[in-house]
Image (tube, rainbow, N blue to C red):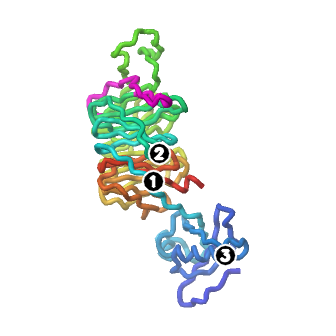
Amino acid sequence: MASKSVDTDTPQIQIRFVTKQQQYAVPDTPHSVPATLLASELNALVNKLLEEPSGISHEVEFDFLVCSEFLRTSLAEHIGERGVSVEEVINVEYIVKHPPPEPQDCLIHDDWVSAVAVCEKWILSGCYDNTIHLWTAKGKHHLTIPGHTSPIKAVAWISLDDETGTFVSASHDQTAILWKWNVENNSVESIHICKGHERGLEAVGVNNTSNLMATGSWDTMLKIWSTSLQDENEDGESVSKRKKTDCTKTRAPLRTMKAHKEAISGVVWSDKTEIVTSSWDHTLKLWDTELGGIKHELMGNKSFFDVDYSDLSRTLVTASADRHVRLYDPRSTEGAIVKSMFTSHTQWVQSVRWSTIEEYLFMSGAYDNNVKLWDTRSPKAPLFDLTGHEDKVLTCNWSNPKFLVSGGADNTVRVFKSKYALK
């Protein structure tokens, strides 16, 4: 039977509390509540219901999903916007609220930080002073790596074990370099210099099996390369017996693809034979790497500065010059391909990265000096603003679920610890 409210002047709504987190389940009896109720008041009500049968005395903070979106206004306003009938019992799903990420470390560089990549406890950073840096997630500096002759615009891990790490850096000097790191000796050597682009590189992406990488450049070309550290001839056969000279270090691309009209700003593998690119030419393109052609093209209204793909939700997020982040479902057969728009940044959004363990979570970094943590079920407002940068945010990374990492024009890398990942 529905519980009664003493307030007879305010319109009432029938709701039923549901949750997938069974330790916090309450009876699914409908409750009659004022239509003006806010999330904070629903939180108090659920905690009161939890006290009775379960004896949970400490207050738990919950977020509330109504019609698959987080409640950020009154119940009546939220339901009204979605055209839901108030004559029916409305399911209100509640989940434990995401705890705020905690500022962990500030890694100081000599110039702008335009690239970051995290693997386990190691952070790679790329700098405008042409150097790459290797750090622990606790902020200890391990190596400064020279080799490029122009700013580093992208870095990516290829592999890492107890003895060896391999990674790639992409630079405005028109090259990408494959590096081998001896973990025990803490020494790095450049194994191959990937040459073929005619202008500066902006983006690099490594596929899931780590045997191929793709680079995007201001020359509008997308190029695919082998990540093997072995010398190879044109047929891909090892020629390690051949006498090594400096020229054997140069590597040519396996494939070059052209369709963009301006710089490629982001590159991500969405499948073993599919790459998604973002560009200053206002388009996203999905490429078939085996056929060497375009499978699909998505048009935007401004330049795209970054794109990332989630294996969990099979959707894309994009960073754009119009200050918005957008969620795309490129495989959508119903309605618009743009599923949501996230508006909170006040200047160009430069970088976006999905969580690798939570299908709804992603982060963004922008020229307004802010990093934001988002849930796709809350398009109107981010979960948290991660403050600390004193100048433009140029790059961000969330490859290790425990750490949200960003780099910026204040010459720093900021590390935030995600307590959510430690549950």
Q: Dot 2 surroundings within 10 Å: few (below 14), some, or many (20 or more)?
A: many
Q: Is residue 64 above or below residue 117?
A: below
Secondary structure at numbered mark 1: strand
- The image quarter containing residue 188 is top left
- Residues at circles 1 and 3 in contact by the CB criterion of under 8 Å: no
Q: Amino acid at mark 3?
A: Leu
| Image side of residue 69 versus residue 247, left or right | right
- The image quarter containing residue 128 is top left
Q: Which residues are magenta?
A: 178-200
Q: Label 1, label 3: how many angstroms apart (C-alpha)? A: 36 Å
Q: Which residue is tagged 2? A: 137
Secondary structure at numbered mark 2: loop
Residue in the picture at 53% in, 61% down: 98
Q: Nearer the viewer, residue 115 or 311?
A: 115
- Residues at circles 1 and 2 in contact by the CB criterion of under 8 Å: yes
Q: Which residue is tagged 3? A: 49
Q: Nearer the viewer, residue 341 or 394?
A: 394
Q: Is residue 289 visible?
A: no
Magenta highlight on residue 183? yes
Residue in the picture at 47% in, 70% down: 72
Q: Quadrant of the C terminus?
A: bottom right
Q: Is residue 64 above or below residue 178?
A: below
Q: Label 1, label 2: how many angstroms apart (C-alpha)? A: 9 Å
- Residue 262: x and y in percent read 27, 39
